[in-house]
Structures are given as structure tokens and as C-alpha cells.
Amino acid sequence: EDKVVQSPLSLVVHEGDTVTLNCSYEVTNFRSLLWYKQEKKAPTFLFMLTSSGIEKKSGRLSSILDKKELSSILNITATQTGDSAIYLCAVNPGVGGGATNKLIFGTGTLLAVQP
Amino acid sequence: NAGVTQTPKFRILKIGQSMTLQCAQDMNHNYMYWYRQDPGMGLKLIYYSVGAGITDKGEVPNGYNVSRSTTEDFPLRLELAAPSQTSVYFCASSYQGSAYEQYFGPGTRLTVT
């Protein structure tokens, strides 16, 4: 059965700290891994990682895909209170040579950044 | 561009009632999805559509139905509501399929009592 596991489940840090969130997966025919940020409402897209794009960076956020270890990390440097959110990892399990139309989500990591 | 819109934002249903959750997108995306999110859980795919007139089941389709008569709209129908359907429902759309970025609506919080 396809599954995505995120750790830790929750994390409390102070402003200015650096955090690393983990995502590991077991899926057939991996196609892509996506990170989303969910504040009070809808998830918003952060990064997409694939075999041809294993590292992404945007400002203080960066993410790396390790296909050998079947995992990904999301790094946030110099955290701010506005980074407080649930961070969701999702994996698209492909079939044959292509992607499926399904996305398997982890349960998320709840990050709280204190002033 | 309004993106993905959902109505209503909140709803309380009694057991056995039915309702339709509305979802619309104005980005001309072919792919649309319905998810539910329970507390402490990730999003679970209920149904998805790859274009007008084409729908298929996701991980947790029981108790739900969908239709896709236009590119813009993708309503989710709950028949005979049960307490197990208490959840937050998100509609999403994407241009290239679920391997790529999806745009989510603001969600509908549904309580069945």
C-alpha cells in the first residue's frame, strides 16, 4: 500500500531558528513529491520535486529529494511567526511510464514559531 | 481570477439528509479533485475528474457522488449523510494532473449530527 509519513508530527521553535521537516514515502513508480503549506484554510503550493529536479529553493525555504532514501526534507531558515502552519508532503505514485491522477498525502507537520 | 471557489463555507446536516457542495474554478483547468481532511489526518482523495464528462473514484468514494458537466464546475453530492462524513472538504484543480501543482479552494466545514 502506498504511504507517506511525515516527521515530526509537531514542532515548536523560536523566531530565527532553522527547522528541518521530514517526509518519507513508499509508493510504486514514484513520479513527484510536492510540499504544501496549510495555514487556517486551503493548502498552498510550495515545491515540486522530481527525478529531474531534486532540489528547490525559494527565499528562506528549500527542499531536497533523496530518491535513494525515498525521502525529502523541507528546510526553513530564520523562521518567522508567519511560518506557523501545517506543512503537508504529498507523493504522486505513477503507473507504468506515467503519472496517476492520485496524490498520497502525509498527515503533516504542525510548526509553531514563537516570537 | 477568483481561482477555486467553494460554497458553502460551513454546514450542519442531520443524519440522513443530503446536500451538494459546490466547487468552481476559473482557470480553465481540466483536472479537478475533491478531498476530505479529518483532524490529524492528511487529505484523502474522494473523486477526481480529468475533464468535462469524465469522473473517477479516489481513495474514499463511498457515500459520495460527483458530476462534471462543464470544465468550470465540479459539485460533490452527499446522499444520506452519516456522522463519519463530518470533515473539512477541499476542492482543487490543476492544469497538468496531480503530479503537478494543485490549487485548492478555501474548504467547506461539514458537521453531521
Image (cartoon, helix red, strand yellow):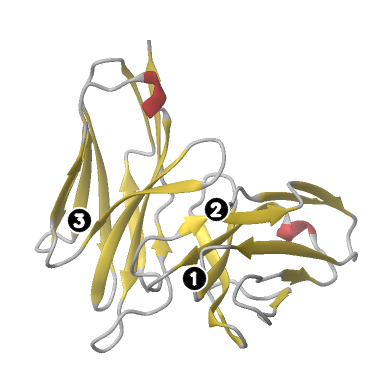
Q: Answer whether labels 2 and 1 touch (C-beta < 8 Å).
A: no
Q: Which residue is mark 3?
A: A71
Of tags 3 and 1, the one toward the viewer is 1
| SS of the residue under disc 3 | strand
The chain identifier of the residue carrying mark 2 reads B
Give the x, y percent position of residue B86: 73, 53
Mark 2 neighbour class, 10 Å CA radius: few under 14, some 14 to 19, many 20 or more: few
Q: Amino acid at mark 2?
A: Asn
Residue at screen point 34% across, 66% down: B100
> Which residue is label 1 attached to?
B29
Disc 1 crowd, CA 10 A, few/some/many (<14, 14-19, 20+): some
For label 2, the residue is: B1
Same chain shared by disc 2 and disc 3: no
Residue at point 68%, 82% (across, down): B69
Percent position of residue A50, x then y: 19, 65
Task: Tell me the element at label 1.
Answer: loop
Select label 2 or label 3 by which is in front.
Answer: 2
Whether residue A29 is situated above or below residue B44 in the rendered picture: below
Residue B96's tag is none
Q: CA distance from mark 2 to mark 1?
A: 13 Å
Relative to the observer, which residue lies in front, A16 or B101? Answer: B101
Q: Quadrant of residue A49?
A: bottom left
- In this rendering, which labeled residue sits more in front, label 2 or label 1? 2
Same-chain status of marks 2 and 1: yes
Closer to the chain start, of discs 2 and 1, is: 2
Q: How far apart, in angstroms, are the residues tagged by discs 2 and 3?
A: 35 Å
Q: Are marks 3 and 1 in contact (CB under 8 Å)?
A: no
Label 2 residue SS: loop
